[in-house]
Image (cartoon, rainbow, N blue to C red):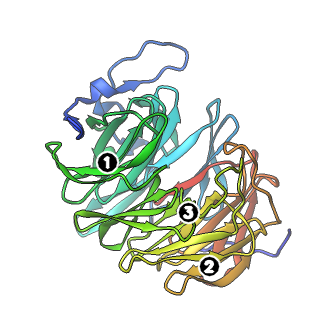
Amino acid sequence: MKRHHTMLGSAVVASALLLTGCQAGDDATDYDAGSSDKKTAGAADDKEDTGHAQELAAAQPRLVTTYDGGILTLDATTLDVIDDTKLEGFNRLNPVGDGRHLMVSVAEGFRLFDAGVWTQPHGDHTHSYAADPQLTDTVFNTELPGHVVNHGEATVLFGDGDGKIQTFDTEDFSDGAPKPQVAEVDEPHHGVAVKLADGSMLHTVGTEDERSGAKVVDSSGKEIASSDECPGVHGEAAAKDEVIALGCENGILLYKEGKFEKIDAPDSFGRIGNQSGSDESQYILGDYKVDEDAELERPERVSVTDTKTGKLSLVDLGASYSFRSLGRGPEGEGVVLSTDGKLKIIDPATASVTEEYPVIDEWEEPVEWQKARPTLFVQDEVAYVSDPAEKTIHIVDLESGEVMAEKSLPHAPNELTGVTG
């Protein structure tokens, strides 16, 4: 699908947690791909050095996308390739939340990636810098690295294989490799954890074979609330007023005002496994699947949950989508990349599609979840859409629907995210 394009002009967390403090040297190591030896990684190892950076007139957002064998860093405005970092295997990316760093899931744990752009406060103004991206030697060790959640002022890493939860003050990443506070759940499982504003920790509950719900504990490990009403619990998103949503095989589980609230799906099996939230909105956007036996269900409806009223609505898109298709716009609007190649804009208050923006050609979700497929990433007022079949990436203005830029890449993009600089 070819169109005339104009370039974008601006950048657009007993049965409770076993809470134990830990030094970074216990859980962070320097990485050497050619050796099994590791040495302690101190915070000074990756401390910012503005002497090797260029000062900018304004913050410079960057995109980061994986491909089979590496990581590409792009200018978020021009889509030019800034760096090509070689890294074998299937690589997963998660932003830390400081506008600069990401976590790359590797065999040893979470490896810190520096996208090379940052902004520092200086009195009544700020200074922004750009440097070369770098896959650092810092690894936060865990077995089977899973979800990374940035919420409020904290970043939390969850290890599926050992149940280890590593918590950081997000701002501490600006000083290098920070020291995590470490806790462990009773049974390792594919889970997630979120640190809340009051210092308590929400985390999922389960085993290697079954996941059943979630609990919240205070800083001493004392249980505040729990629920076992969320079979197959998966994913996490936050809504306005710090309401945390977790997906279930029969609806969605909310944590708000110190209590859990279960919202049932309209079907006996109505799985919500992926959610997208917005601090600007009381609504949670989620996927919705009803075929319990399908190897791969290609649903054509998404869920919209009102966290204030508890109403769960379904929105028919007229086309299917994947788990990498959900996003939120600057005003909390839902954004879905569907297999007809269009971005569907959803008004969550009315649970309806209000706009459809054609971006790429029609596509089909691959059966293997690791395989590349068109992916959506939203940052500020623009959406970024990748097309691995064509090795391209597109910038879309969310207000007008205009495809403002398109660029060919040297590799087929897979995962896609970004930093604000």
- Tell me which numbered mark, 2 or 3, is placed earlier along the sequence: 3
- Residue 253's quadrant in the figure? bottom left
- The dot on residue 345 is 2
Would you say the residues marked 1 and 2 are in contact, meaning their CB atoms lie under 8 Å apart?
A: no
Residue 365 in the image: above or below residue 159: below
Question: Which residue is at a point 49% across and 35% down the rendered structure image?
Answer: 209
Residue under numbered circle 1: 13
- Tell me which numbered mark, 3 or 1, is placed earlier along the sequence: 1
In the displayed structure image, the side of residue 392 where residue 212 appears, left or right:
left
- Secondary structure of residue under mark 1: loop
In front: 384, or 287?
A: 287
Which amino acid type is shown beneath numbered disc 2?
Answer: Ile
- What distance separates the C-alpha of mark 1 from that of mark 2? 31 Å
Looking at the rendered image, the quarter that the N terminus falls into is bottom right
- What distance separates the C-alpha of mark 3 from that of mark 1? 29 Å
Tell me where residue 409 appears, x and y as whole percent: 74, 51
Which amino acid type is shown beneath numbered disc 1?
Answer: Val
- Secondary structure of residue under mark 2: strand
Residue under numbered circle 3: 268
Q: Nearer the viewer, mark 1 or mark 2?
A: 1
- Secondary structure of residue under mark 3: loop
In front: 228, or 144?
A: 228
